[in-house]
Amino acid sequence: MEIVIQPTAEAAGELAARVIGDELRAKPDLVLGLATGNTMEAVYARLVRMHRQQGLDFSRCRTFNLDEYVGLSASHRNSYRHYMNHNLFLNVNIDLRNTYLPDGTAADLEAECRDYEQLIAKCGGIDFQLLGVGRAGHLGFNEPVSSLRSRTRVKVLSPVTLAQNGPLFQPPDQMPRRAITMGVGTILESRRCLLLATGEEKADIVAKAVEGPVTSMISATALQMHPRCQVVVDEAAASRLKEADYYRWIFENEPKCRSYPNELSPADTDGRCLSPAVEEVVSRGRMNKN
Ligand code: GLP
């Protein structure tokens, strides 16, 4: 894991958007896993700006969202399809036919989950997965005791999630009690992932996710098993990390880690940098020399 502490929520969102922009430029037909929630709004606003101001091109990109509420149609204002259309898809040059979310209104939900997994596989798997984290530590809607090898399926939402997301519904008891979510196993198969968490209310769960024991009670802890995972947080969300100084030390002592490594050549570093992207560049360089 690579922990990146940014001074503000704004800077953290900006960094996440920059990383996605770099991925998309490097691979225009990127298979991009997306997340919803308040935290992501800043990322999507920046991606829209990058599209408008820098011509960031989404025309060949395919996207898969983590989850969708059971029973909400695409036009429902609380559906994640509605959220994605309005926060990102309709504001960039993506082909809507290449944007996938589970269909929470499907007559056969089990078949829908199976098909979703198959579609991800057919597109070659997820290259980059963007993740948020719920206050109780869920990724997508992988509620406590979600198997660490779980696949896309229907989950019953926990009381904590109902309390957290209920106020977004009018009235709150209109919130669906179930959702389709990618599984923890599905998420772990992404080639690279980035968890973004900001604000004091996420400080506890970030500390558990990064430094706590891996447990199915908190699906975010499973990211410790992901080979290429970045956790981007602001100071408030980092405030309960016991080893925050160590994570900062890495950046202070490895200045090249700070600017994301597109500009780096293998000769620029001796390989001590912990950034997975830098490690890849370095090992590619070593392979070329051998
Ligand atoms: C929902 C989504 C999660 C998301 C979480 C955090 O529960 N299913 O994928 O991570 O919200 O939301 P927020 O960013 O609003 O805290």
Image (spheres, rainbow, N blue to C red):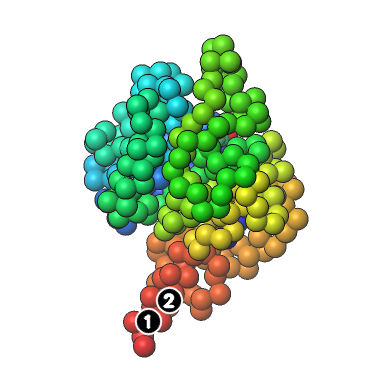
Q: x, y percentage for residue 272?
A: 56, 75
Mark number displayed over residue 189: none
Asked if ligand 1 lies within 8 A of label 2, the reply is no
Quarter holding residue 137: top right
Q: x, y percentage for residue 63?
A: 34, 42
Are the two marked residues, 2 and 1, in contact with CB atoms closer than 8 angstroms? yes
Q: Is residue 289 among the parts visible in the rendering?
A: yes
Quarter holding residue 264: bottom left
Mark number displayed over residue 287: 1
Q: Which element carries disc 2, helix, strand or loop?
A: helix
Report which residue position mark 2 lands on: 283
* Most distant residue in the bottom direction: 290
Residue at 24 percent across and 35 percent down: it is 97
Q: Quadrant of the N terminus?
A: bottom right
Residue at 38 percent across and 78 percent down: it is 285
Q: How many marks?
A: 2
Which residue is at the front of the view, 122 or 113?
Answer: 113
- Ligand 1 quadrant? top right
